[in-house]
Amino acid sequence: MTYQTPIGEPSALRAGTTWNWKRVESGDFPIADGWTYTYYLTGKTSLSFAGVNATTDFTVTVAATTTAAVAAGNYAWELRASLSGAVYIVDSGAFDVTADVNVTAASDQRTVAEKNLALVEAEMAARITGDGSAHDSYTIGTRQLNKLPMAELRTMRAVYAAEVQRQRFGGRLPPYLAWSVRP
């Protein structure tokens, strides 16, 4: 079986692997006239790489040794065309880069929102099952500490859950699925 180079930018990539795709040139900036295309990524890491021009398309190949340095996270990208000092933005979008599990398998790759969501859910579960503290506040020496009310925990859970979903869906909330309710 032969590897088929995909057409167009992927929505998700993995650090530490070879990134490869094909892109058709923009009709406004023909390769035959000398225009070159370069991708620019910005996120937790910044990176730029050029496409290898053919006749009316170009292939992007970024070596695994280069992508190994890219931190996991969401990245905005721009595709720029340039010729003789002129630079134009051709297209833009977003990539979701996941960690290289070969290198980071033993580390926690969750985002801050994912970690906070897990903490809030664990506290809610502890209170529901009765495993949590039965007191709404407690005192240590001269300091008093109050627990967050369950209503505030539910609000925090909704905020963190929405943030996690936006992270997983490239900055947007996932598609809304309406369930019909029958009388």
Image (spheres, rainbow, N blue to C red):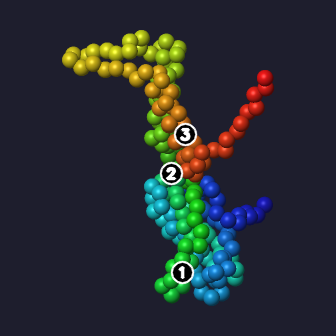
Q: Quadrant of the N terminus?
A: bottom right
Other residues around mark 1 within 10 Å, as few (<14) / some (14–19) / many (≥20): some
The part of the image, by quadrant, that contains residue 60 is: bottom right
Residue 123 position in % (x across, y down): 47, 23
Image point (50%, 22%), residue name: 124
Q: Which three-letter amino acid code belongs to the residue tagged 2?
A: Ala
Mark 3 or 2 closer to N-term?
2
Residue 89 position in % (x across, y down): 55, 73
Residue 29 position in % (x across, y down): 62, 81
Label 1 close to label 3 by CB (< 8 Å): no
Image point (45%, 26%), residue name: 152
Image point (54%, 63%), residue name: 77
Which residue is the site of mark 2? 72
Which residue is the site of mark 1? 82
167 relative position to 10: left or right: left
Element type where label 2 sits in the image: loop
108 relative position to 91: left or right: left
Q: Which three-letter amino acid code belongs to the residue tagged 3?
A: Ala
Between tags 3 and 2, which lies in front?
Answer: 3
Which residue is the site of mark 3? 162
Can the viewer see residue 166 in this picture? yes
The part of the image, by quadrant, that contains residue 55 is: bottom right
Element type where label 3 sits in the image: helix
Element type where label 1 sits in the image: strand
Q: Is residue 88 above or below residue 98?
A: below
Near-viewer residue (154 or 5): 154
What whole-number distance in Å separates the C-alpha atoms at marks 1 and 3?
39 Å
Near-viewer residue (9 or 27): 27
